[in-house]
Amino acid sequence: MGQKDFSHGATDAVKVLGAMAMAAAVIKVAGNVMGLSPLPDLFPKNSANNNSKKPKKKVRVYMDGCFDMMHYGHANALRQARALGDELVVGVVSDEEIKANKGPPVMSMDERVVMVSSVKWVNEIIPDAPYEINEEFMNKLFTEYKIDYIIHGDDPCLLPDGSDAYAHAKKAGRYKQIKRTEGVSSTDIVGRMLLCVRDRPNETPVHASLQRQFSHGHTGSQENGSGGGAGTRVSHFLPTSRRIVQFSNGKGPNPNARIVYMDGAFDLFHAGHVETLKLARAMGDFLLVGIHSDQIVSAHRGPNHPVMHVHERSLSVLACRYVDEVIIGAPWEVTKDMITTFNISLVVHGTCAEENIHLKNGEHDPYAAAKEAGIYTTIKSPRDITTSTIIQRIFTNHEAYKKRNEKKMESEKKYYQSKTYVNGD
């Protein structure tokens, strides 16, 4: 057939199809008028793709942990786990299981659940989870919770008998591994807390014995402005701009957003911080949190404070689902210029704070400008907990924590001796 004949054929075909479509439209209108049952569409929309539009099954992943004295390393592990699926279910190990396998927890189950629930990458919580992923619990995860994969870090998790807590998941081919966040651990944080009371006469005997347990054999002077003396391990965290981006929401407020500002040290980020931030966020559209610099915290709370340095504290706060953005190293005073620069609508502060926070000589109220503008208010803190109360818990049961950390230090030492590079972050 020549090109001309083909063109005529194509034109005729178009005419026929057009006539069919017009006839179908007429019949449909007539049917509607006469009350007849409608005919099916001659050319249904996306008919060729109807079968391919089925909703894709969401991949659900599970990660468990004690999450005691939760820090940015825990949050980063949850971030990595969430990246391996569409929904993250987190098991919070029960107090009894922690005692049996590691020693007494510092934070209660309720506090630990609040902390894990506040992490923005978490979709669901399973409280009182077992320490070991035994076959029975693993099958429950697969059937009842529709879990596809079980996640854990590259550091070993051993039961008291020396066996692998994730052996069943690995055998089932449903195990995935993430990279451990270097530079922080609960054991390390306990060591730092002990420095916060070294100048208290009543605590000296206890502190001296415990400080030797947690010195980790490191020598040298203070690091990162966090205080400390010879033989003390402070922080080995190396902050990067990429890590901050990973934790950030990556977007600012809308032009007409009601911006709420709250500042503080947020040291040893805990359930009291989280629940106060939740209330603050509910007072506006965008919550901006100021994280005070190490120098400011030290000046107002005393030597060896803060326990966590400013980048560590910033990441912990950024991981909280109620926080939209942070100012890293925020000033002590909320000035009129600062209110204008960030378009702040409301400045808030919790009622529960450290007892030893005080104004330095010649220093005026840091919230004076906000009060003068009529945009300052206080929030009744839902929990009576501070950094100092957490430190006190360690000292109240120091012998038990000493044994717990001795055991943990040995396992961490073995980890670092045998560790290899793991791709991912």
Image (tube, rainbow, N blue to C red):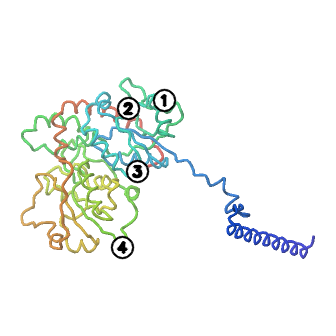
Number of the front mark, 4 or 1: 4
Mark 3 Cα shell of 10 Å, populated few (<14), some (14-19), many (≥20): many
What's under tag 2, amino acid-wise?
Pro
Which label is found at residue 168? 1
The residue closer to the viewer here, 364 or 384, is 384
Give the alpha-carbon distance from disc 4 to disc 3, as whole Å: 26 Å
Give the alpha-carbon distance from disc 3 to disc 1, as whole Å: 26 Å
Query: Taking 217 as reference, is 32 left or right?
Result: right
What's under tag 4, amino acid-wise?
Pro
Q: Earlier in the sequence, mark 4 or mark 3?
A: 3
Quadrant position of residue 18: bottom right
| Residue 386 image offset from top left, x and y in percent | 18, 48
| Residue 302 image offset from top left, x and y in percent | 13, 52
Name above or below for residue 96 compared with residue 202. above
Mark 2 Cα shell of 10 Å, populated few (<14), some (14-19), many (≥20): many
The outermost residue toward the top is 161
Which element is circle 1 on? helix
Name above or below for residue 43 compared with residue 415. below
Which label is found at residue 121? 3
Give the alpha-carbon distance from disc 4 to disc 1, as whole Å: 52 Å
